[in-house]
Image (tube, rainbow, N blue to C red):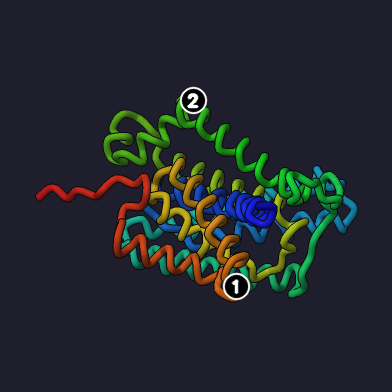
């Protein structure tokens, strides 16, 4: 029983990070129909920027905030200089652009930072907390709590604010939103900034546990994409459920089968969803009117 609980704790921790990455995919996809495969680099930038700002003498809380702001600025630049000029290009072209942006950001990070693994101190120490025979790190609680706060804040943003409703209107019909006076270019820029900031927060929260380096973004982007597909691309609640499920699948696979196969779980999930349930658990089936 304690083993199962231990695997659940581990799965929820990593699943919360996957959920945040999947949420970044969802926000940009809803606002622009773009699948942004550089989403994982935002997580890397958040963690690496915090590490180096902290090492330069900036207090950790201020370093974390600065890292989020810097990453959000990178997200805005990605939209302005790469996505917006290619607005009328095909979906495949835009996906290739985001993959190219991912490679570019990784290369820049390799030059600006370095190739080593890094971490900074946990927010509340490293002494594990025992619960029913299993243990959980205080930083894992920070990760799960932080993800919960972000999802709650976004729910309020999308349902209680005019700007949030404008994002939903743009996602539903960009032309109609423009006709009623919504600045869709601003909404897209806001979506990229928001998505990048959420990725950076995930990087800040998880770095004390998993470490960070310039090349962690690829795996996180793939896992986040798998989580978004599992929950249903474009559905924020689906991103949350998909991320947590994927984390639990990985943890249980590593615990009861072998850690060698845990990374394969994400790819098996993608294939299973594409073949059996193309719209995901909470996605809507696409309808083409002819």
Q: Nearer the viewer, residue 283 or 28?
A: 283
User: Which residue is the extreme one toward the right?
Assistant: 57
Is 264 on the left-hand or right-hand side of 8? left
User: Which residue is the extreme one toward the front?
Assistant: 1
User: Which residue is the extreme one toward the left?
Assistant: 290
Q: Nearer the viewer, residue 270 or 36?
A: 270
Residue 259 placement (x, y as % from top left): 62, 71
Quadrant assignment, res 118: bottom right
Above or below, 174 relative to 114: above
Residue with the mark numbered 2: 161
Above or below, 189 relative to 96: above
Residue with the mark numbered 1: 258
Is 36 on the left-hand or right-hand side of 148? left
Residue drawn 52% across the image and 66% down it: 101
Q: Secondary structure at mark 1?
A: loop
Q: Residue 124: which disc?
A: none
Residue 143 placement (x, y as % from top left): 68, 47
Q: Nearer the viewer, residue 243 or 286?
A: 243
Residue drawn 55% across the image and 70% down it: 263
Tell me whether circle 2 and circle 1 mark residues in contact (CB < 8 Å). no
Residue drawn 65% across the image and 51% down it: 5
Residue 6 placement (x, y as % from top left): 68, 54
- Please tell me which of labels 2 and 1 falls first in the chain: 2
Quadrant assignment, res 132: top right
Instruction: Measure how far apart labels 2 and 1 are at the Cα level.
Output: 46 Å
Residue drawn 68% across the image and 69% down it: 214
């Amino acid at each position: 029983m304690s083993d199962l609980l231990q695997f659940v704790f581990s799965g929820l921790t990593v699943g919360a990070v996957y959920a945040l990455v999947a949420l970044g995919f969802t926000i940009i996809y809803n606002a622009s129909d773009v699948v942004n495969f550089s989403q994982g680099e935002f997580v890397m930038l958040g963690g690496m920027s915090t590490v180096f700002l902290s090492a330069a003498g900036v207090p950790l809380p201020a370093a974390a905030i600065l890292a989020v702001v810097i990453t959000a600025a990178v997200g805005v630049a990605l939209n302005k200089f790469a996505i917006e000029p290619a607005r009328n290009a095909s979906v495949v072209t835009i996906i290739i652009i985001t993959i190219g942006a991912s490679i570019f950001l990784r290369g820049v990070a390799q030059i600006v930072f370095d190739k080593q693994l890094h971490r900074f101190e946990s927010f509340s120490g490293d002494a594990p907390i025992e619960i029913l025979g299993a243990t959980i790190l205080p930083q894992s609680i920070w990760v799960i709590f932080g993800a919960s706060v972000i999802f709650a804040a976004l729910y309020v943003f999308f349902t209680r604010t005019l700007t949030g409703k404008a994002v939903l209107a743009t996602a539903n019909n960009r032309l109609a939103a423009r006709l009623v006076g919504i600045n869709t270019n601003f909404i897209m820029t806001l979506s990229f900034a928001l998505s990048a900031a959420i990725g950076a927060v995930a990087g800040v929260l998880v770095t004390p546990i998993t470490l960070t380096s310039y090349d962690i973004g690829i795996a996180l982007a793939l896992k986040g994409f798998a989580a978004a597909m599992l929950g249903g691309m474009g559905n924020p609640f689906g991103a949350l459920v998909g991320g947590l499920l994927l984390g639990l699948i990985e943890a249980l696979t590593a615990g009861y089968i072998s850690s060698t196969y845990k990374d394969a779980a994400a790819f098996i999930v993608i294939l299973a969803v594409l073949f059996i349930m193309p719209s995901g658990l909470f996605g809507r089936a696409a309808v083409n009117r002819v």
